[in-house]
Image: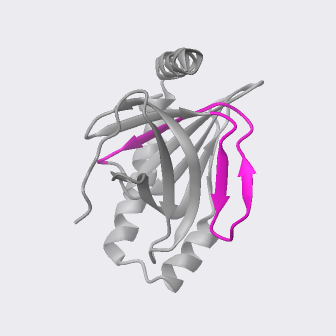
Amino acid sequence: MVKSRIPKEGDTIKIQSYKHDGNIHRVWSETRILKGTDHVIIGGNDHTLVTESDGRTWITREPAIVYFHAEYWFNVICMFREDGVYYYCNLSSPFACDEEALKYIDYDLDIKVYPNGKYHLLDEDEYEQHMNQMKYPKDIDVILRRNVDILQQWIEHKKGPFAPDFIKVWRNRFQKLRNRS
C-alpha cells in the first residue's frame, strides 16, 4: 500500500500524471503547495519544467494555480495570461500523494474555460480510443461522465476554483510565497 503524505504549505512537490494502464503520461517538476489537506491540494507554479511520456520537455509559459480534490474526478489548472484567466480541467482520478509526488490518472477528457466564461469539452475522440484500447471499466465511464456534469455546473455557477475570490486569494498567496523564497 502506498503511504499517503499530504504536503504542507510551502513544500515543493512533483506532479505525476499517469494513464489508466499505469504508464506515466506527464510530470511537472515542481509545484509550490499553497494548501494541503486530506481533501484539497492547491499549488502554484510558473515556468515549470514539464516532461512528457516520450521524454520531450517544455516549460510552462505563465503562472498557474492548480486545484486537486480527493472526492472529485477532475483537477483544474488556472492559468494567468495577459487577457485573463484560462482554465484547463482534466477529467482524472482523485489525487494520491506519497513521498515522491502528487499522482493521478488522466482520463483524456478535458474542459477548457476561457476568460469570458465560455467552455468546451475536448478530446472526446481520444477518450473513446483509450477507453477501448485500455479497456476502461464501465463504472469508470459512468463516474467520468457524471464528473463532466459536475464540473460544468461548477463552471456555470462559478464554484470552487472558478469563483473570482478563489483566483484573488490563491494568486496572492502564491506571489507572497514566491517573494519569500
Quarter of the picture holding the N terminus? bottom left
Residue 151 image point, x, y percent: 45, 44
Per the image, is 139 magenta? no
In front of the other: 18 or 112 = 18
**As drawn, is 71 to the left or to the right of 90?**
left
**Residue 104, above or below 67:** below
The residue that appears at 49% across and 77% down in the rendered structure is 131
In front of the other: 78 or 177 = 177
Residue 66 image point, x, y percent: 51, 38
**Residue 78, above or below 70:** above
Place residue 67 in its image quadrant.
Answer: top left
The residue that appears at 48% across and 16% down in the rendered structure is 169
Residue 172 image point, x, y percent: 54, 15
**Residue 6, above or below 115:** below
**As drawn, is 70 to the left or to the right of 164?**
left
The residue that appears at 41% across and 61% down in the rendered structure is 144
Per the image, is 49 magenta? yes
In front of the other: 152 or 34 = 34
Quarter of the picture holding the C terminus? top right
The residue that appears at 35% across and 38% down in the rendered structure is 7
Residue 74 image point, x, y percent: 44, 50
**Residue 179, above or below 7:** above
Count of marks overlaid on the render: 0
Query: What's the magenta region?
Result: 46-71
